[in-house]
Image (tube, rainbow, N blue to C red):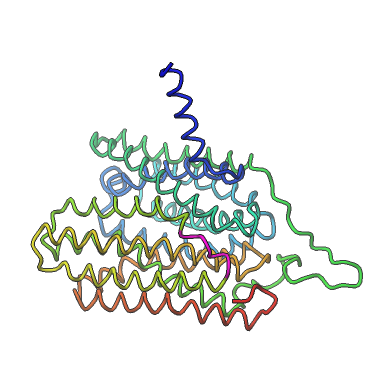
Amino acid sequence: MPENVRPAGFVAAVRRRLHPDPTVRRLAGITLVNTLGNGLSLSVAVLFFTRVLGLSAAQLGLGMTAAGLCGVVASVPAGRAADRWGARRVLVALVTVEAFGTAGYALVHSYPAFVALACLVAAVDRGSAAVRNALYAEVLPADRRVAGRAYLRVVTNAGICAGTGLGAIALQVDTRPVYLTAILADAVSFAVVAVMFHRLPAAERPSSAAKPGESAPEGSRPTGRRRNPALRDGAFLAVTALNAVLGLQFAILEVGVPLWIVQQTEAPRITVAGTLIVNTLLVIALQVRATRGTEERSAAARACGRAGLLLAASCLVLALSHGLPAVLAAVVVLGGVALQSLGEVLGQAGGWALSYDLAGERDHGAYQGVYNAGTSAALMAGPALVTTAVIGFGTAGWLALGALLAAAGLGMGPAARWAGRRDPGLQPG
């Protein structure tokens, strides 16, 4: 009897974890495949480029910087393409190109070829991120978009963790064939994702035809022949810039904290792994919950404000770890990362809500393209800014970073109110 009950109970437990919306479940499956490949690739990329392709650290850094610039530039036109030809169709094309581009690393034999390929892969990767966000707006109801994205972010963290575990095996084996296999496996994951997006039911796009005697509404006019509305929306640009500043938190976690632990504290080096575990677990546990109540613009702005204050507190706590005994320093660092993680889930929830709300039901691709360009810029510039502040100025650098993050979060409120004044037709804040 117990043998028969146990599998049924396991299946029921798994089903309870699945999202009730079938569209979100399909998107979650796509996300899981994508992030498994990403986690695997991220784990081995540096060693693949340096040991298999033979690049120096300076060559790799310069190539990645050029690729980052291409990623920032690609987001806006990719978003416009989604408005013109449909997010699903454009996304399938971009992910397919990324599959071939990733596989192409196995054929690279010169530095110029590496830089050109890295720029192509980064451009389609960041472009597909913008289009993917526009697709979520097309296929998910307005009142469930942010919660759906939160669920997908939880899946993202789980997938990257699993992919990183596979990457750790490749790192342990440490041979050229294994590194090539990992890169090609990532390419295959992109190909599978392209097929899965192709099979996703197409969303109904709003008609561009106006009723007799009425002019076409702003959001329903053809987008291919007019200027990008998001680039002329001052309030939205302000939110995008403030969100980009809040995005420095990722460089703090991924670059600033590890360097701080190793160079400026007595904490054991294993604390670096502990910080990533704490962050991942808290994001998985709290990201969906953090979206509750952010449907209203004013609530989303307040969430960003609280996020900025939590991130500032995190910087202060991390600064206090300098000069402490090893065990106490590790505890303080982990406490600072816990505060960062709380700020992260709130900031992401509020930022997503504002990015969709300020666009209304208009030109999702254009707005998400511009918003994603700001995020990409933060991801590109963040490591250099954070390391300069933290390693160059120590405690004073942490305090300056904290003040900057707090100001960015608190600035979301005035930006949201500006949006209400410039467009009273949107939800008031």
Quarter of the figure with the N terminus: top left
- What is the number of callouts on the image? 0
Quarter of the figure with the C terminus: bottom right
In the image, residue 222 sits, relative to residue 111, either above or below, namely below
Residue at the front extreme, as displayed: 1
User: Which is more toward the observer, 1 or 227?
Assistant: 1
Left/right placement of residue 286 relative to residue 335 reads right
Give the magenta part as a residue range.
290-296
Residue 33 placement (x, y as % from top left): 47, 40
In the image, residue 186 sits, relative to residue 126, either above or below, namely above
Residue 112 placement (x, y as % from top left): 39, 55
Residue 374 placement (x, y as % from top left): 48, 69
SS majority, magenta? loop
User: Which is more toward the observer, 147 or 69?
Assistant: 147
User: Which is more toward the observer, 415 or 236?
Assistant: 415
User: Any magenta on residue 95?
Assistant: no
Residue 412 placement (x, y as % from top left): 48, 76
Q: Residue at x 14, y 68 (%)?
A: 322
User: Which is more toward the observer, 289 or 50?
Assistant: 289
Residue at the right extreme, as displayed: 212
The quarter holding residue 26 reads top right
In the image, residue 350 sits, relative to residue 131, either above or below, namely below
Residue at the top extreme, as displayed: 1
The quarter holding residue 64 reads bottom left
Q: Residue at x 49, y 54 (%)?
A: 150
Q: Residue at x 56, y 67 (%)?
A: 355
